[in-house]
Amino acid sequence: MENTFGSVAYLRKLNAQELGYRNGQPGKAGRYFLVSKGAVGFFPPLSEIIVNDNVILDIIPPFSDDVVLTKYVYHNDRIAGEGTRDEYRLYLNTDNDPGRNYFKPGDIILIVKILDTENNLTYKILRYAVSSREYTRLDSMIGAASLNRRTESHALIALRELTFLGDLRRVKIGKKIIPKEIISEAFDLPVNHAFVGEEDKEEATRIIRNRSFRDLVMYFYEDRCAITGKNLLIDYRFFSNLEAAHIFSRASGGGSHPSNGIALERNLHWAFDKGFFTLTTDYKVDVHPKVMTVPYLSSKHGHEIFLPQDDRSKPNKGSIQWHRDNVFGLFLRTEM
């Protein structure tokens, strides 16, 4: 499968403040990359209505080919009247910044977008220390095209001007890694949200949200279908027939909390969304009486589902009740 680079790269000269240095001492605060507002179009759009809206990006760090899930946040609490911040941040974690000291003040990072044939978006980060031979040239390019004349630390540069960077020709996409911070913070997400449709109005962001939701649900279900108990049957690159189903649908306000998801093979996901079956609050399959004549479904009626080991990610009972009240039997109301 051939991957395609975006036409523009984002260059950023890092400073001590964002890397957690205080009074010259490292490790005194959280580490992140501040993203210039002039470069926000380089990343997926985030909401101005939802306070501290965020999305989980697939990012390949400089030292690896592995894809590390990484949190990108719009701290918009000043706009919402709940704070003082109005800035975009890409947060570092244990798997993209090992030892919390990989990136140093003065380093230049280069971020490039990679799209595969299915339009799955991945970002690759390259790092250039002050001692690297490419540093002076990159520093000059940032100064000439700076998005902020006061700091001269952010720039968008056409990729055709960066052909002297041999690292760009060696970019590969490896296995996916979910850092412990992303797993922990997933439980801060809402099971349902008040802004119905607001998170999904931008297609690019919606696709990325769905992918990160799937990644987390698959992690907790150990890549096994909750009903059949089987592992992935077809898994090639970004193609899989095991999917993450929302229990409380996103279109109706269902959120991205792991407990609002369940791993289902594709046929069962479709049947679940059409209301051919639902779940009971004691985690058993409840097949609709009208389709008990379908062996594929009736054979699963009453079976207990496979549950994640982490209790926090077990199907939310409120979401199950919503599915029973609103989706169960939906096929009867929509059939031609």
Image (cartoon, grey):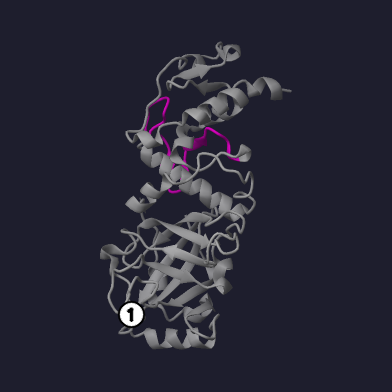
Measured as percent of width and height from the top left, residue 28 is found at 30, 69
Residue farthest to the right, as pictured: 336
Query: Is 208 in the magenta?
Result: no
Tell me: 129 left or right of 300. Answer: left
Q: Is residue 248 located in the magenta-colored stretch of the structure?
A: yes
Q: Is residue 179 in view from this perspective?
A: no
Q: Which residues are magenta?
A: 223-250
Question: Can you say which quadrant of the picture contains the C terminus?
Answer: top right
Residue ID at (62%, 37%): 252
The quarter of the displayed image where residue 249 is located = top right
Q: In the rendered view, tell whether residue 298 sits above or below residue 268.
A: above
Residue at the image point whose x is 47% and y is 19% from the top: 285
Question: Few, some or many C-alpha atoms within 10 Å of disc 1 (few <14, some 14-19, many ≥20)?
Answer: some
- Could you tell me which residue is drawn at 39 percent across and 76 percent down? 166
Which residue sits furthest front? 82
Above or below — where is 46 with respect to 239? below
Q: Is residue 242 above or below residue 101?
A: above
Residue type at mark 1: give it: Ala
Q: Position of residue 277 (x, y in %)?
A: 54, 21
Residue where numbered disc 1 is placed: 129
Please state the horizontal and vertical placement of residue 310, each as a whole percent of the image: 33, 36
The correct choice, above or below, for 214 with respect to 124 in the image is: above
